[in-house]
Amino acid sequence: MEPPVQTQKLGDVTLVTLSRPEVRNAVDDATAHALFDAFVAFEADAHARVAVFHGAHGHFCAGWDLQAAARLAAQGDAALRAGLDFAADDVRRAPPGPRGPMGPSRLMLSKPVIAAVSGAAVAGGMELALWCDLRVMEEDAYFGIYCRRFGVPLIDGGTVRLPRLIGMGHAMDLILTGRKVEAAEALHMGLCNRVVPPGQARDAALALARQLAAFPQNTLNADRASTYHQWALPLPEALHQEWARGQHCIADGLEGATRFAAGSGRHGKF
């Protein structure tokens, strides 16, 4: 039997695959630990520049494994508390951060992660996709806060990341109704970044990851960090922290200007 989380190093791109086909890649406690460990290892790997998060067997992730949760509940309060040990973690813990209910959802990494979304990315699975920086979605894949039907709350960043990504109006619609969101609508509202034919999300996400990995990394990651950290800051402070991060990349920019002057990258060529 294959492990629920598998990691492959493909040059400077890391592929993290979630594989629990019997439950459409729903996450139980052991799987949450394994996902957390996989992305902490990616963060610590100096040779890994971008990660792709993929669900095997036709689905990204169907959320928290409610059958596993029901078994914990049946064992009594002690078992339930043991299975929810992430709850004691302080979300302000030193980087890369604490474990979340679904595993990596409270991590703040210093490098990009791209979600390759096929089939269902619902409930906690949708929250995992929202945790990623970019989402590549197959035409027949779908999002949805399906946990609305069972009274399961969003505790993996859904109420925080979703309105920041698509705006309050769209977010409230999806959060309150729990309705299905197919790829075309997801692209329209900015919930995903690319839509590709069925079966091609992983390869398209890997190609995008290699594109990001080829750029000067100090500048890419400084700009990424500034974009995340500006949310809670007044405009003057946000501009200051942008400069504080960017000034360390000036030498890279000057080297790039030299390459441009020599003829590289003209007319928007990558």
Image: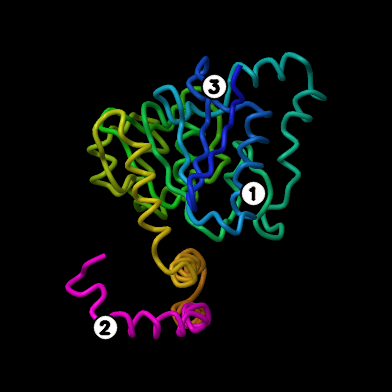
The N terminus - image quarter: top right
| Label whose residue precedes the other's in the sequence (1 or 2) | 1
Q: Callout 3: 10 Å neighbours few (<14), some, many (20+)?
A: many
Q: Position of residue 75 (x, y in %)?
A: 77, 15
Q: Secondary structure at mark 3?
A: loop
| Label whose residue precedes the other's in the sequence (3 or 1) | 3
Residue 177: quarter of image: top left
Task: Give the total number of marks visible in the rendering.
Answer: 3
Q: Nearer the viewer, residue 264 or 54?
A: 264
The C terminus - image quarter: bottom left
**Which region is colored magenta?**
242-270
Please tell me the numbered disc located at residue 262. Answer: 2
Type of residue at label 1? Val
Coloration mode: rainbow
| In the image: residue 44, left or right of residue 149 | right
User: With respect to residue 209, does 215 lie above or below?
Assistant: below
Residue on which disc 3 sits: 20
User: With respect to residue 210, does 184 lie above or below?
Assistant: above
- Tell me, yes or no, whether the highlighted magenta stretch contains residue 264: yes
Q: Is residue 231 something that shows in the picture?
A: no
Outermost residue on the left side: it is: 267
Residue at left 50%, top 18%? 21
Q: Callout 1: 10 Å neighbours few (<14), some, many (20+)?
A: some
- Tell me, yes or no, whether the highlighted magenta stretch contains residue 249: yes
Residue at left 59%, top 50%? 42
Q: Secondary structure at mark 2?
A: loop
Residue on which disc 1 sits: 40
Type of residue at label 2? Ala
Type of residue at label 3? Arg
Q: Position of residue 150 (x, y in %)?
A: 52, 22
Circle 1 or circle 2, nearest the eye: 2
